[in-house]
Image: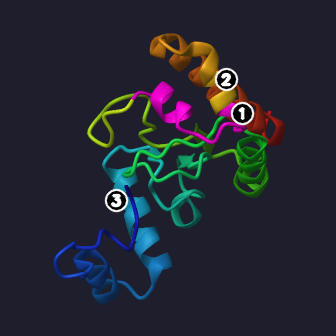
Amino acid sequence: SCQPNGSEERTTGKRPYRETVLAKYEDDAAWAAATGERLGDWGFNTLGAWSNASLLGDRMAYTVILYITGSDWLEGNVPDYFSPEFEARCSDVASKQVLPRKDDPNLLGWFLDNELRWGPDWRSPRTLLADYLALPEDAPGRIEAEKWVGDPQGFLRVVADRYFQVTTTAVREADP
């Protein structure tokens, strides 16, 4: 990704790349000008989703990651995709992040989220069916999950369909 801040070292809390940027460039705009020129010289024509589009998006095509679910991908938390709150969150994210960029000619597209947990993985040994069956009894996702007891793969298809239906509808309403 193209970011003037760089990553934080876990042990020291320092940001060596950021320190270098501050030492070498007058400000983030000067860093962006040099970086945009360098990327062009190297033949790059698109910024990745984790790049700073506000600094570089006027120079080349870019993508944006929305993190539309609001869940922490490192934790692997799964929201109730069947709840009205999830629909409201998706609409809110779309109105705040998608709508302002809808007419930007450099915008290539949207990434909805990052590393969603669709089943057992390094973050949790549980299936989505098990997660949803653990929701409160009146939760919309729990009510749907109860129809799929014994069929985690069938429920997974229903959850994926619901996730993509809600998220893409919200994005397309803001940016057809």
Q: Relative to 7, is 153 on the left or the right?
A: right
Question: Callout 1: 10 Å neighbours few (<14), some, many (20+)?
Answer: some
First of labels 3, 1 by sequence position: 3
Q: CA distance from mark 3 to mark 2?
A: 51 Å
Q: Are marks 1 and 2 in contact (CB under 8 Å)?
A: yes
Quadrant location of residue 14?
bottom left
Question: Callout 3: 10 Å neighbours few (<14), some, many (20+)?
Answer: few
Above or below, comparing residue 29 to residue 44 in the picture: below
Residue 168: x and y in percent read 70, 31
Q: CA distance from mark 3 to mark 1?
A: 50 Å
Magenta part of the chain: 127-141
Disc 1 target residue: 140
Q: SS class of the residue under badge 1?
A: helix
Q: Which mark is residue 38?
A: 3
Residue 41: x and y in percent read 34, 52
Residue at 59 percent of width and 39 percent of height: 108
Q: In the depicted view, which residue is nearer to us: 88 or 104?
A: 88
Q: Quadrant of the C terminus?
A: top right
Front tag of 3 and 2: 2
Residue at 67 percent of width and 23 percent of height: 144
Disc 2 target residue: 144
Residue at 49 percent of width and 11 percent of height: 151
Q: CA distance from mark 1 to mark 2?
A: 6 Å
Residue 9: x and y in percent read 21, 73
Is residue 30 in sight in this rendering? yes
